[in-house]
């Protein structure tokens, strides 16, 4: 049976600490245990501070991973947790590789991105992991009627793994509202991962990522994000307040 992960509190939001996240999720796939995965970083944490519905979505997710450097430093320095950063894109990649090698027969669905991007991402993965089984794709740009058709399709084909790339917090809210369509599936919000896999965009060089500066590369690629980056110093300041007040916590 899939063990419940250790839960830590980062500025009042849960973060789950597991030795091996991909293997834990693969077990959930094999046991048909429905799971919503949230990839928490400083920006999402600050958005949650102004968005009660986002707090509820994160709090109800079965797995919240430490995606951002700020969240990891909070866990390491303030809560003394032995944890490493696991970006959402890397978790998704590891899970897809495991599925490609397993005999689970799990079907994967990609939803999000500009027209054609999700299919290009599928083409990439069919080369990387020929054993993967794909149930389909759908663009993130559509009419209400097309979205209803998408929901009907998901309910009919019941993919076991559904990756949703609609951006934060839209993807988290969409998953929470629609996961009942495939209650036994693993749902993961993957942000711009389809753009990376399709070759539309590139990830930061390893030396930047290894020094917790991947956000700087994203700002270089998308200068319009500068306002969103203000969440980083805001997160740091709020973390100090929590440290002084002793609100940080770890539960089992």
Image (cartoon, rainbow, N blue to C red):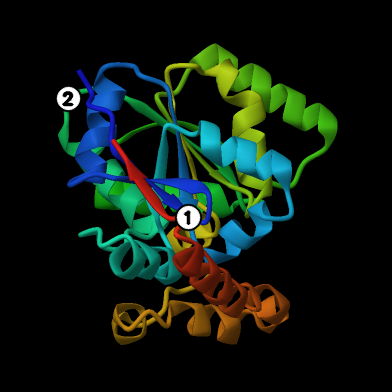
148 in relation to 118, above or below = above
Q: Which mark is residue 247?
A: 1
Q: What residue appears at the point 57 percent right and 76 percent down from the top-left corner?
A: 237
Q: What residue did someone put label 2 on?
A: 103
Task: Give the secondary structure at mark 2.
Answer: loop
Pointer 2 local density, CA inside 10 Å: few below 14, some 14–19, many at least 20: few
Q: Is residue 184 left or right of residue 116?
A: left
Can residue 199 be seen from the camera position used here?
Answer: no
Q: What residue appears at the point 51 percent right and 85 percent down from the top-left corner?
A: 216
Task: Give the secondary structure at mark 1.
Answer: loop
For marks 2 and 1, give the one nearer the viewer. Answer: 1
- Indicate the quadrant containing the C terminus: top left, top right, bottom left or bottom right: top left
Spot the residue most to the front: 245
Horizontal and vertical percent position of residue 62: 42, 32
Q: Is residue 21 left or right of residue 212?
A: left
Horizontal and vertical percent position of residue 33: 35, 19
Q: Name the one closer to the observer, 146 or 230.
A: 230
107 in relation to 169, above or below = above
Horizontal and vertical percent position of residue 179: 57, 24
Pointer 1 local density, CA inside 10 Å: few below 14, some 14–19, many at least 20: few
């Amino acid at each position: 049976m899939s063990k419940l992960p250790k839960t830590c509190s980062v500025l009042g939001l849960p973060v789950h600490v597991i030795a091996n996240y991909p293997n834990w999720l693969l077990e959930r796939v094999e046991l048909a245990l429905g799971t919503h995965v949230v990839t928490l970083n400083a920006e999402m944490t600050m958005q949650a501070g102004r968005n009660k519905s986002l707090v509820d979505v994160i709090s109800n997710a079965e797995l919240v991973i430490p995606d951002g450097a700020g969240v990891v430093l909070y866990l390491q320095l303030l809560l003394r947790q032995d944890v490493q950063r696991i970006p959402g894109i890397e978790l998704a990649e590891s899970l897809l590789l495991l599925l490609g090698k397993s005999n689970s027969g799990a079907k994967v669905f990609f939803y999000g991105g500009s027209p054609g991007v999700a299919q290009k991402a599928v083409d990439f993965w069919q080369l990387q992991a020929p054993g993967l089984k794909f149930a389909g794709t759908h663009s993130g740009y559509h009419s209400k009627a097309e979205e209803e058709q998408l929901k009907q399709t998901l309910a009919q084909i019941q993919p076991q793994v559904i990756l949703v790339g609609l951006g934060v917090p839209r993807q988290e809210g969409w998953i929470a509202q629609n996961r009942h369509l495939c209650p036994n599936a693993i749902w993961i919000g993957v942000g711009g991962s389809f753009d990376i896999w399709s070759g539309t965009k590139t990830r930061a060089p390893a030396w930047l990522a290894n020094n917790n500066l991947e956000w700087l590369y994203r700002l270089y690629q998308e200068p319009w994000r500068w306002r969103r980056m203000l969440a980083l110093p805001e997160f740091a300041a709020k973390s100090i307040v929590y440290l002084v007040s002793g609100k940080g916590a770890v539960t089992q």
